[in-house]
């Protein structure tokens, strides 16, 4: 959310202790955050006028049934005497409920800050509040009309990690709810495979932007990368399950020719197919974010044009990569706060760009070409078209084609071919994915 909005919430809001990323990561610790309802206004549950937690016992996931849940549940957790919930810690009765509520409320505050207004639930004619269920015995998580409920993830070693502790998963599921609320629900028969992929991509982007509102995440990413976000780093991993496993990678190397064919009937695609279909769009928008950050570093005089150009080019050998890493390390030294300010600016640009893009879309018969056109149009409003080259080249590298009327005819050939740069980190993702040395 815009930083001034965040400062107002911090001055007046209610405190929660949240994990910014899955606590299976060794470096992750609880961080105090503030949500917008003032102390004393959040009742036992936690519960407010927008959502409430039901800490269900022995519940199975919603399928044909729907809220409200009427079965056995743990007692609703109450705030401390000061009206805050940050006294709760892992192992405490009610921590699961508080962590889920605090995470979902924080994500809602962040995105209402970018939208500049409250987000009205798409199910408001049926349910007054969003029901939050921290635990069902199920190896998944999902959202639907009036609810979000969490299960668990099972890693390769058989360990189960509850999703109510995974901020990325919580933010992803609220992302689906917000996209339905803002774009509307598709009409019967109007759902395309690309719309389903767009939903998964958008939900992942909700999580990435939200995670960048934790100081510890921003600080850790900068200190481990020195600002060279083209290297592998934790910001790109969505829904970590362990130090080496995650649900998806935002900075992936997928192009449209490498994912399931969106021309297939929707009935022919599995849920993993749908997630994979959305990955080129996620990757393109993540590219736009990273390139915006680098361009702003150059504009701020924090890195040189030469270093930026070196990081853009395909590395021919390990010495090239080492030279780029040393260049960023020198530029970053004793400039953490300056780099951080630029990264937060790029984060807020991405949030505003996404909001402007979604405002231009219909859920009916959606294709990635319309998303591409909406990105171009949203950037014109935000920056007077300063990011057009970045957006066009990032989309084109992913083989996401712009509609003819949105192309800049002074740049691409009439056939739609583009003069592309191949960015190094995309190639590194590809090599890493294929298990090759790089």
Image (spheres, rainbow, N blue to C red):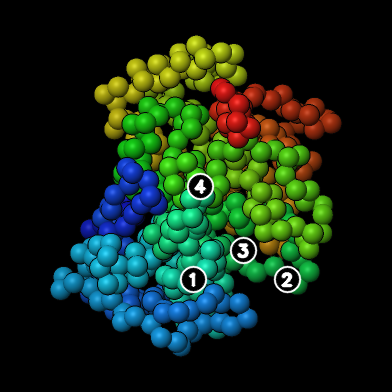
Question: Along the horizontal axis of the image, is 359 left or right of 118?
Answer: right
Label 2 secondary element? loop
Question: Along the horizontal axis of the image, is 252 left or right of 159?
Answer: right
Which numbered disc, 4 or 2, marks the residue closer to the eye?
4
Q: Quadrant of the C terminus?
A: top right
Mark 4 vs mark 2, CA separation in Å? 33 Å
Label 3 secondary element? helix
Q: Determine whether label 2 and label 1 are within 8 Å by CB.
A: no
Mark 3 vs mark 2, CA separation in Å? 12 Å
Label 2 vs 1, first from the N-terminus: 1
Label 4 secondary element? strand
Q: Residue furthest bottom?
A: 70
Who's the residue at 66% across and 49% down the image? 276
Label 1 vs 4, first from the N-terminus: 1
Residue 97: % across, % down: 35, 70
Mark 2 vs mark 1, CA separation in Å? 32 Å
Q: Determine whether label 1 and label 4 are within 8 Å by CB.
A: no
The label number, if any, that marks residue 187 in the structure image:
2
Label 3 vs 1, first from the N-terminus: 1
Q: Determine whether label 4 and label 2 are within 8 Å by CB.
A: no
Determine if residue 305 is in view: no
Q: Residues within 10 Å of mark 1 (few under 14, many from 20)?
A: some
Residue 143: % across, % down: 54, 68
Q: What residue does disc 4 label?
A: 246
Question: Along the horizontal axis of the image, is 261 left or right of 198?
Answer: right
Q: Residues within 10 Å of mark 3 (few under 14, many from 20)?
A: some
Who's the residue at 42% across and 70% down the image? 134
Mark 4 vs mark 3, CA separation in Å? 28 Å
Q: What residue does disc 1 label?
A: 137
Q: What residue does disc 3 label?
A: 183
Which numbered disc, 1 or 4, marks the residue closer to the eye?
1
Q: Residue furthest right?
A: 415
């Amino acid at each position: 959310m815009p930083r001034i909005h965040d400062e107002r919430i911090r001055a007046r809001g209610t405190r929660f202790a949240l994990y910014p990323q899955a606590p299976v990561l060794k470096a992750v610790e609880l961080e105090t955050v503030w949500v917008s309802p003032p102390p004393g206004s959040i009742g036992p549950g936690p519960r407010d006028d927008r959502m409430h937690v039901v800490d269900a016992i022995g519940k199975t996931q919603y399928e044909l049934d729907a809220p409200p849940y009427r079965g056995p549940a743990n007692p609703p957790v109450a705030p401390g005497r000061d009206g805050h919930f940050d006294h709760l810690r892992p192992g405490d009765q009610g921590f699961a409920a508080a962590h889920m509520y605090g995470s979902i409320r924080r994500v809602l505050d962040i995105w209402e800050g970018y939208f500049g207004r409250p987000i009205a639930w798409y199910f408001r004619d049926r349910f007054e509040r969003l029901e939050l269920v921290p635990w069902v015995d199920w190896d998944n998580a999902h959202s639907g009309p009036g609810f979000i409920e969490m299960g668990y993830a099972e890693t390769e070693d058989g360990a189960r990690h509850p999703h109510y502790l995974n901020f990325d998963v919580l933010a992803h599921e609220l992302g689906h709810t917000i996209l339905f609320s803002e774009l509307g629900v598709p009409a019967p028969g109007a759902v395309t495979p690309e719309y389903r992929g767009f939903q998964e991509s958008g939900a992942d982007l909700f999580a990435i932007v939200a995670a960048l509102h934790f100081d510890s995440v921003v600080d850790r990413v900068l200190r481990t990368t020195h600002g060279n976000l083209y290297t592998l780093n934790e910001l790109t991993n969505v829904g970590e399950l362990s130090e080496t496993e995650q649900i998806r990678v935002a900075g992936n190397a997928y192009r449209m020719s490498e994912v399931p064919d969106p021309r297939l009937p929707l009935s022919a695609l599995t849920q993993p197919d749908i997630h994979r279909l959305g990955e080129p769009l996620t990757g393109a928008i993540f590219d736009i974010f990273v390139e915006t950050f680098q361009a702003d570093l150059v504009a701020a005089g924090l890195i040189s044009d030469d270093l930026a150009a070196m990081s853009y080019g395909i590395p021919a050998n390990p010495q090239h990569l080492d030279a780029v890493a040393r260049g960023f390390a020198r530029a970053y030294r004793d400039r953490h706060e300056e780099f951080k300010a630029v990264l937060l600016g790029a984060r807020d640009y991405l949030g505003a760009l996404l909001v402007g893009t979604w405002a231009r879309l219909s859920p009916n018969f959606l294709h990635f070409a319309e998303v591409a056109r909406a990105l171009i149009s949203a950037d014109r409003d935000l920056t007077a078209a300063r990011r057009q080259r970045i957006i066009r080249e990032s989309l084109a590298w992913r083989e996401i084609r712009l509609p003819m009327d949105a192309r800049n005819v002074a740049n691409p050939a009439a056939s739609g071919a583009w003069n592309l740069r191949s960015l190094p980190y995309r190639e590194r993702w590809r090599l890493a994915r294929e298990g090759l040395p790089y």
